[in-house]
Image (cartoon, helix red, strand yellow):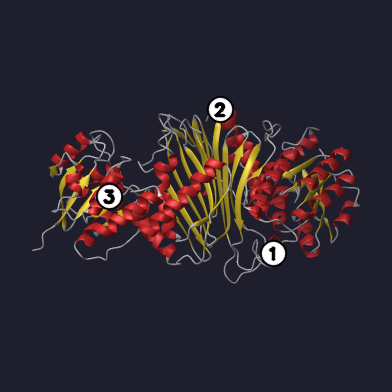
Amino acid sequence: MTSPIGVGIIGANRYAAALEDYAAPLAGAAVSAIAPSPNGRDRTAAAALARRLPAAFARDWGSVARDPALGVVLVASDDPGRGAAVEAALGAGKIVVCPAPAATTTEALDRLSAVQTRGHGVLLASGEIRHTPAGARAVALAAAGGLGTLHSIYAAVRLRVPTRASGADSVLDRVGWDLLDTLCAAVPHAPRRVHATVAGLFGGTEDTAAIVARLGDETIATIDLSRCLPASIPTVPQGEVEIEMIGSRDALRLEPYRTAVRFHGERGAARLPWIDEPVLSMLHEGVRIAAGEAARPNHFEHFRRVVGFMDAVKASAARGDTVTVA
Amino acid sequence: MARIRIGLIGCGGIARSAHLPAMHHLREQVTLVAAADVNVEAARAAAAPWGADAYADGHQLLARKDIDVVVIATPEKSHPEWTEAAAATGRHVLCEKPMATSVEDADAMIAACHRAGVRLMIAHSRRFTMRYMQVRRAVDRGDVGAVRLVRENERRSRARTGESGGYYSATHWSGDPNVTVGAAILNGVHETDLLRWFVGAEPVSVSCEHKITMEGNRGVPDFLTYTVRFANGAIGSSELSNCLPPGYPAFHQFELYGDRGALRAKDHDLISVTRFREGAAEFPGGYEILLHNLPAYVREHAAFVDAMRRDAPVPMPPEEARAALRLALAGVESGRTGRVVHLTAGGPVEGGRTQA
């Protein structure tokens, strides 16, 4: 009998919590160690999760990143310093799953790419939307030309109105990465012209972004990101996400979280167990790679395109003018 | 009370689907006495149910003495010519949108009607759609606080494969670059009008991308997406696509977010207006499909007739249509150059309330 692939977790955000529901179906793998994020702020939550799963609790994230018994490391952290954990695990040859962006600059990506090459690890980062069951099908269909020549993509994420002003929590950084990741997966062409308007309209510093981009293959993308929803509009933690892809032959409309199931129990807030299915999907992919059942992909070209797109968006917003990408 | 006597110039699709049915609905108040179209068969078909006369030349219609109002339903390039000709003969004018293809032409239309002392209203039917009347009233009441963000997406189906004659196709006038600017003003002017109307301020900049998506299109951009900044800091945006495959739900998706709440109206949800407040959601309107909305056309005609009967201003002044056209044309310029177009900042929108 083959031993299960060891899975370690660094951080205790909702991606980690999702494993409580999914630990059993994670076939061929076992969560064996949990450590807090590099900034240590989720130490209590990580320890509690370790007790519930159960798994060993490690005070030092580095020991999980380098644990030779682990084949896969899930970096489940909102800590901006999570890149250090990703880098350490990649360098130790792990299959690293990081649903949030692992790096947000070209320089940081180059460093991770070099570490991946040296350490023989694999980075599976970002892509929560495109790892939803519906998102995966939609992206695959568009990328394969299944809609005909792609004319346009409309993509929107709407979140709750912010309860506090926060300059660091720009809507671009909060949800923009995931949407650009989806776009770049569906259309493997960099933008050649970007208009971005970013403003604080609802109490946040940058709570709204209206982006129009002409991509290299002439697909036109319209992206709306906003923290605009009043409390009476029900929404999942990922916000309202809708994507339309319109091609010369077919079109599709995608609301990847609309069908998520809610359990309304007697004891407090509703639970949304299957809303985190993308994390499980990424973990499954990581486990299969670690087990030698799937090829070891290199996604850095895609990551660079996403970072380049975001750089153009931020440059356009800062200038208040169109940015033409060379 | 004597019925208002109408002469109709242009008897194509919008006349058949909107103006003639609206007149029929108001037949106790109005009557069609003459119809004109370069396709005289179309004019005859429009005139026949009314026992009206048909002409191949609108000037023959204008030469009659028994017409009070001229309804112009021709392609937009000829709107100035017919408006000025109708005004010169002392007729009030209800003209289909878009008002014209240039701001200068729009100014000439307004000036001609002003000189002649006749009323001019541009048929921006969306202002007479129940859902948007409800939205505007909610905004006016302060239900959502200050308007901060407005988004409108419009989706229309292309003609079925093998069929010809659909909008922006090679055989339709809307696909002829000598006749029209394209989607930016043909259906996009609805969006620019609604954005201004709901935001309640003038635009200061617009950035746009547009393109041709329809097979056989002869050079008229039929897709566009744009972002508008307004003088009060609000953002408006809109995306219009006319090439959806048959079966895709043709719809208008409207969202308005204020600093104290939101309003939404989405065709595909089969709910005309949903008002989200902090406490609860409310559904103040019943369902009316937006595209080809006969009640809106009827309200539009009725409001124009009512203004005439009461000797009152028309509910939507032509300056409002001019402003919507100006913004739409700025979008065209941005799409053409790939640059942000800056507009002179103005004050609040005035006189733009639809009364019904």
Q: Earlier in the sequence, mark 2 or mark 1?
A: 2
For mark 2, does the 10 Å Cα neighbourhood hold few (<14), some (14 to 19), or many (20 or more) residues? some
**Numbered tag placed on residue A33 in the rendering:** none
User: Residue shown at 68%/66% (left/top)?
Assistant: B218
Q: Tag 1: residue type?
A: His
Element carrying mark 3: helix
Q: Residue B223 at what x, y percent from top left?
A: 60, 56
Q: Chain of mark 3?
A: A
Q: Chain of mark 1?
A: B
Q: Quadrant of residue B232?
A: top right
Viewer-nearest of discs 3 and 1: 3
Is A26 left, or right, of B202 in this rendering? left
**Numbered tag placed on residue B172 in the rendering:** 1
Whether residue B272 is visible, yes or no, is no
For marks 2 and 1, give the CA distance.
44 Å
Q: Residue B29 at what x, y percent from top left?
A: 76, 42
Element carrying mark 1: loop
Whether residue A304 is visible, yes or no, is yes
- Disc 3 marks which residue? A87
User: Residue shown at 76%/46% (left/top)?
Assistant: B103
Q: Tag 3: residue type?
A: Glu
Q: Tag 2: residue type?
A: Gly
- Disc 2 marks which residue? B142
